[in-house]
Image (cartoon, rainbow, N blue to C red):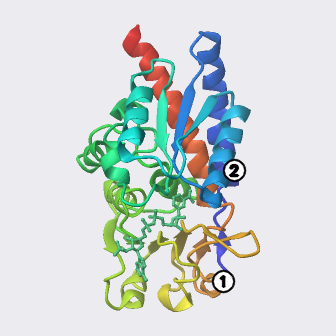
Amino acid sequence: MTAAELSGAELAATVRAEATARAAELTAAGRPPTLAVVTATADRSSAWYVRSIVRAAERCGLACAVHDLGPDAEPAAIAAELARLSADRAVHGVMLQTPLPAGTSLEELALSIAVEKDVDGANPLSLGRLASGLPAFAPATAEAVVALLDHHKVELSGRHAVVVGRSTVVGKPAAHLLLDRDATVTVCHSRTRELAAVTGTADVLVAAVGRPGLITAGHVRPGAVVIDVGTNPTPEGGLVGDVAPDAAERAGALTPVPGGVGPVTTALLLRHTVLAAERAGVARG
Ligand code: NAP
């Protein structure tokens, strides 16, 4: 058996097309949706990701400005920039890119992003609202996991979803979103014992670790749906996921890397920014 491919291309294109149409309406009304990305790193794969966000935003008619504070930025300066952008009425979405300078905490800094502009769900208040069933922007990657499952008509209610990874940007919010969809959810992490025994019971397995090839055929229940969130740069300049190629022989369906979760994540970030701009217009009247 070879797994069916759960591509993100079609869903990403649909989300981008919708964002493009709504962005055009906002721009015509004199309120071009605007995303601000704050960076403080010299990391090359992060720079590549930010460039891809800027390109996607511009193609969809959104404005996107990168505010690069450099890898030596002090936490107070990053927090001040996030607060300044949060107070700027011309900015609708604010995103803090990782990695951050050593000794800084994404969660601590993201408290300076206004919740209504927190389009990548990084502010712990957004995660708290999400976990409480209140409206909030979910981290785009976590939302992309569930959006891809929906797009490919994977049933979640009553099924066992196992999420490997418990970060506040991917694993935890993905677990909450799956729980909201009535899946029975197990979250694994680096201290989980007998990982393969746990993942081997999953109907839906989400790998969000950042270790190439961690999830092998031996971790996958035959026929399971596997979502590979991992994006690990290779020495050759490519990208591989957390799921080893042999897992495709056991899984019923599997997302490709690249081309699975990634493009949907970027598209959802744009959708969130457009939504934030629409809501700002309604709030202002
Ligand atoms: P992270 O903050 O480093 O978290 C990794 C998680 O994996 C942690 O919870 C860690 O457990 C767990 N882990 C590490 N080694 C493990 C092991 N051997 N067995 C089981 N669990 C293990 O990473 P992240 O920010 O969540 O990102 C995860 C991956 O997703 C990365 O490859 C990242 O590049 C990718 N990503 C992709 C997108 C996209 O759009 N496609 C967006 C964001 C992130 P502990 O908590 O115990 O340390």
Q: Secondary structure at mark 2?
A: helix
Nearer to us in this view, 220 or 122: 122
Of callouts 2 and 1, the N-terminal one: 2
Picture coordinates of residue 225 (x, y %)? 53, 72
Ligand 1 picture quarter: bottom left
Q: Residue at x 62, y 40 (%)?
A: 15
Lateral position of residue 119 relative to residue 49, left or right = left
Task: Report if the CB atoms under discs 2 and 1 are less than 8 Å apart.
Answer: no
- In percent of the image, x 38 and y 90: which residue is there? 197
Task: Work out whether residue 150 or residue 90 is closer to the camera in this orientation and state it.
Answer: 90
Q: Give the CA distance from mark 2 to mark 1.
A: 23 Å
Amino acid carrying label 2: it is: Glu
Q: Which mark is residue 265?
A: none
In the image, taking residue 191 as reference, residue 273 lies left or right, namely right
Which is more toward the observer, 52 or 154?
52
Residue type (three-letter) at the residue carrying disc 1? Pro
Can you identify the residue that label 1 sits on? 245
Q: Which residue is disc 2 drawn over?
A: 10
User: Which is closer to the viewer, label 2 or label 1?
Assistant: 1
Residue 122, visible in the rendered structure:
no
Image coordinates of residue 80 in percent, x first then y, are: 38, 34
Question: Which secondary structure lies at badge 1?
Answer: helix
Q: Is residue 93 left or right of residue 243?
A: left
**On-image quarter of the N terminus:** bottom right
Mark 2 residue crowding within 10 angstroms, few (<14) / some (14–19) / many (20+): some
